[in-house]
Amino acid sequence: MLKTVVFACLVAMAYAGCNPLKLQVVKQQWAQAEGYGNDRESFITNVFTRLFDKHPEARALFDRVRGDNVYSAEFHAHAMRVLGGIDRVINLLNDEATMDADLAHLKTQHDGRKIKMMYYSFFKEAMMQEIPDAIGQCFNADAWSACFDKILSGITGADGPFTVNE
């Protein structure tokens, strides 16, 4: 009986949020996905291209950084800042206090922009499509969804899950 209870608890933990196992998977897969040098630039450009192809109205959120042209210097600089923020927060997933402080800072940057929640879900959707293209079939969608929801919850102040309902 005790073994059954322990097993049930372990299974429940495995499916609960961005737990220690999932965050390790995400960190390892992120290192593969984002790559180095030009790979990093291609990765984030592809994420935004996916976002804008599927949700063209999202470009308007990026007017001040030339969202009309993902290859412009202004947009490229913004995309690299986004990538840097994602990289930083993913690497802080196992340092909750520092991650929360970083997410609080990102939240203040996004609050004034009045971004609708659906756009955070759309961005997550684009990430969840680009990462497996970058790393192949070892992509762990459950881990990524849980941990990216944790990140988006910190940026938006809203509870996840962040899903696209079509």
Image: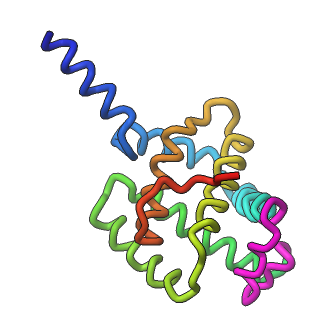
Residue 135 visible in the snapshot = yes
For residue 132, above or below residue 98 = above
Residue 41 visible in the snapshot = no
- In the image, farthest residue toward the front: 166
- Residue nearest the viewer, comparing 111 with 27: 111
- Residue nearest the viewer, comparing 94 with 163: 163
- State the extent of the magenta-drawn residues as a range: 52-71
Residue 123 image-quadrant placement:
bottom right
Q: Tell me how the rendering is colored.
A: rainbow
Residue 70 image-quadrant placement:
bottom right
Does residue 115 appear to the left or right of 60 in the view shown?
left
Q: Position of residue 74 (x, y in %)?
A: 76, 84
Name which residue lies at 42% across and 45% down: 23
- In the image, farthest residue toward the left: 2
Does residue 78 appear to the left or right of 22 in the view shown?
right
- Residue nearest the viewer, comparing 27 with 55: 55
Does residue 132 appear to the left or right of 143 in the view shown?
right
Q: Is residue 59 magenta?
A: yes
For residue 24, above or below residue 12 = below
Name which residue lies at 71% across and 52% down: 166
Name which residue lies at 84% across and 62% down: 53
For residue 77, above or below residue 46 = below
Q: Position of residue 130 (x, y in %)?
A: 71, 49
Q: Quadrant of the N terminus?
A: top left
Q: Is residue 117 magenta?
A: no
Q: For the stretch drawn in magenta, what is the main secondary structure?
A: helix
